[in-house]
């Protein structure tokens, strides 16, 4: 790591940020814990913010079409969280395996783990892409979409699901980079993806010169092309010879023993995200059940903004996964624990600031995202309610990713199962259907559930069983 004593004031800050954004792979098992956390967290925060930009850009431009288009995009994204969950589960498994091998200084095993993760992802994604493309209208109807929404959005759903491979690989390969300690490459791939998505979205939706006006289909094409180009950049970097990871063609020959190990980590990791995703799908189903497009459109605007500010906190917690994995591999469990608490403090401060911003500044933000007065009302209500639990979200994320980085993917899975399925789903249903709180009942259920996740995960982290996990 760079010696910053040669710099003072603003130069020191800029030098640190420059290293974080361009430094490449690092050994995070020694040196300052604060420096290690921030060097990983800065590019990971930017990476997660850029990931959330996909949804925000789509909803911004599609919101200029009509509320039916917004609902179609929102419902598709709700179901697409299943694909995100699988991608995040595989990414988490790859991060844990690669980080542990890097900590053990076994770069050959780290490279092979990365390659076998990609092989597994390729085999899995074929089925998801085909199913989503074929059953797109049925997916929207199952989510409670009215006929006009199905007619408007089926093609959007079909195109996005057809590009599931790029979603999966974008998540997975970024997880590989993070496990190797190179968070800057993961960030750069999202820069490329978003740059093309932002440029293409308005052009393809509205048309320009020889480019035909595609409407909602244009948003799907822009997003898919952007992700595809991001994956191509990742592959280009993996094929290079500069970093610690040196992937060879022989590494891609299926090793069923290693694939089984990846599966054992990935299925519980995927399950933990699927459990949460299924709960979000259920909440989306409740919101669409009100039959007023303005309610669901407002909810989708709020969710996009919430995720935009939650994902930076998720970036900080991703840094914890790498630090825990590498330090456990280097037989430094106490350093892994200290790194987790350090990141938790930073996350709490950040989420406190976001809470204040959302509670008092939500109105102009929502008005910028959607011009419909009815949608604005529900979006503002959602933002103000959900922001009350942001501090708990920040701490809970760090604790859950500490387990994941240690390779203990079962603990977060059980926590999510209890909190989301046993608590959130029935609680949201009671609040909306029996206590007649309407959309506000869903918002209250979200806050309550994330608070419960935070409490349980923190207690289990303090017990320390995660330090003894072998991967």
Image (spheres, grey):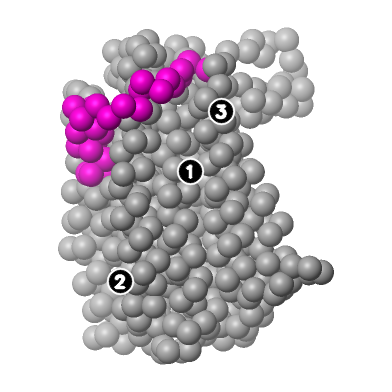
Label placed on residue 237: 3
Neighbor class of circle 2 (other Cα within 10 Å; few <14, some 14-19, many 20+) is: many
What is the magenta segment's predominant secondary structure?
helix
Give left or right: position of 164 versus 273: right
Instruction: Please say whether residue 51 is visible from this viewpoint.
Output: yes
Q: Position of residue 301 (x, y in %)?
A: 54, 70
Of callouts 2 and 3, the N-terminal one = 3
CA gap between label 1 and label 3 equals 13 Å
Residue plotted at (31% across, 38% down)? 120
Would you place residue 262 above or below residue 373 in this image? Answer: above
Would you place residue 177 above or below residue 279 in this image? Answer: above
Quadrant in the rendering for residue 185: top right
| Magenta range | 243-269
The number of callouts visible is 3
Residue plotted at (45% across, 68% down)? 158
Neighbor class of circle 3 (other Cα within 10 Å; few <14, some 14-19, many 20+) is: some
Residue plotted at (37% across, 10% down)? 105
Q: Which tag is nearer the camera, tag 2 or tag 1?
A: 1
Q: Element under label 3?
A: helix
Q: Identify the residue under disc 1.
A: 170
Give left or right: position of 470 versus 228: left
Is residue 248 part of the magenta span, yes or no? Answer: yes
> Looking at the figure, which quarter contains the N terminus?
top right
Label placed on residue 279: none
Label placed on residue 282: 2
């Amino acid at each position: 790591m760079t010696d910053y004593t040669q710099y003072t004031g603003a130069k020191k800050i800029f030098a640190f940020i420059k290293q974080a954004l361009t430094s490449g792979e690092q050994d995070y098992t020694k040196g300052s814990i604060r420096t290690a956390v921030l060097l990983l967290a800065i590019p990971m925060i930017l990476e997660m913010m850029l990931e959330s930009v996909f949804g925000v850009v789509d909803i911004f431009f599609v919101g200029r079409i009509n509320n039916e288009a917004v609902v179609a995009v929102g419902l598709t994204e709700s179901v697409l969280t299943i694909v995100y969950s699988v991608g995040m589960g595989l990414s988490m498994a790859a991060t844990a395996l690669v980080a542990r091998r890097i900590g053990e200084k076994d770069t050959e095993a780290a490279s092979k783990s990365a390659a076998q993760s990609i092989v597994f992802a390729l085999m899995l994604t074929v089925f998801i892409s085909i199913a989503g493309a074929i059953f797109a209208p049925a997916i929207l109807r199952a989510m409670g979409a009215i006929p006009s929404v199905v007619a408007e959005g089926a093609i959007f759903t079909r195109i996005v699901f057809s590009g599931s491979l790029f979603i999966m690989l974008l998540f997975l390969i970024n997880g590989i980079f993070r496990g190797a300690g190179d968070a800057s490459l993961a960030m750069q791939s999202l820069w490329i993806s978003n740059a093309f998505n932002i440029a293409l979205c308005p052009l393809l939706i509205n048309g320009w010169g020889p480019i035909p006006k595609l409407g909602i289909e244009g948003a799907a094409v822009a997003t898919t092309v952007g992700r595809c180009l991001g994956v191509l950049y990742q592959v280009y970097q993996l094929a290079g010879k500069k970093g610690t990871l040196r992937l060879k063609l022989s590494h891609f020959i299926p090793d069923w023993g290693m694939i089984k190990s990846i599966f054992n980590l990935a299925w519980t990791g995927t399950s933990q995200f699927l459990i949460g995703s299924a709960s979000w799908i259920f909440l989306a189903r409740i919101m669409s059940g009100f039959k007023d497009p303005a309610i669901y459109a407002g909810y989708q605007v709020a969710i996009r903004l919430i995720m935009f500010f939650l994902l930076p906190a998720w970036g900080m917690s991703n840094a914890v996964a790498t630090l825990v994995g590498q330090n456990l591999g280097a037989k430094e469990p106490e350093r892994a624990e200290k790194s987790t608490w350090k990141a938790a403090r930073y996350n709490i401060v950040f989420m406190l600031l976001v809470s204040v911003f959302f509670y008092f500044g939500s109105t102009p933000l929502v008005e910028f995202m959607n011009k419909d007065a009815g949608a604005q009302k529900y979006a503002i209500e959602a933002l103000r309610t959900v922001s009350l639990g942001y501090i708990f979200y920040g701490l809970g994320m760090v604790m859950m990713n500490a387990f994941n980085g240690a390779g203990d993917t079962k603990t977060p899975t059980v926590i999510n199962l209890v909190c989301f399925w046993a608590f959130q789903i029935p609680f949201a249903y009671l609040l909306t259907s029996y206590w007649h709180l309407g959309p506000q009942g869903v918002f209250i259920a979200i806050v309550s559930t994330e608070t419960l996740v935070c409490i349980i995960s923190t207690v289990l982290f303090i017990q320390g069983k995660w330090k003894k996990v072998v991967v």
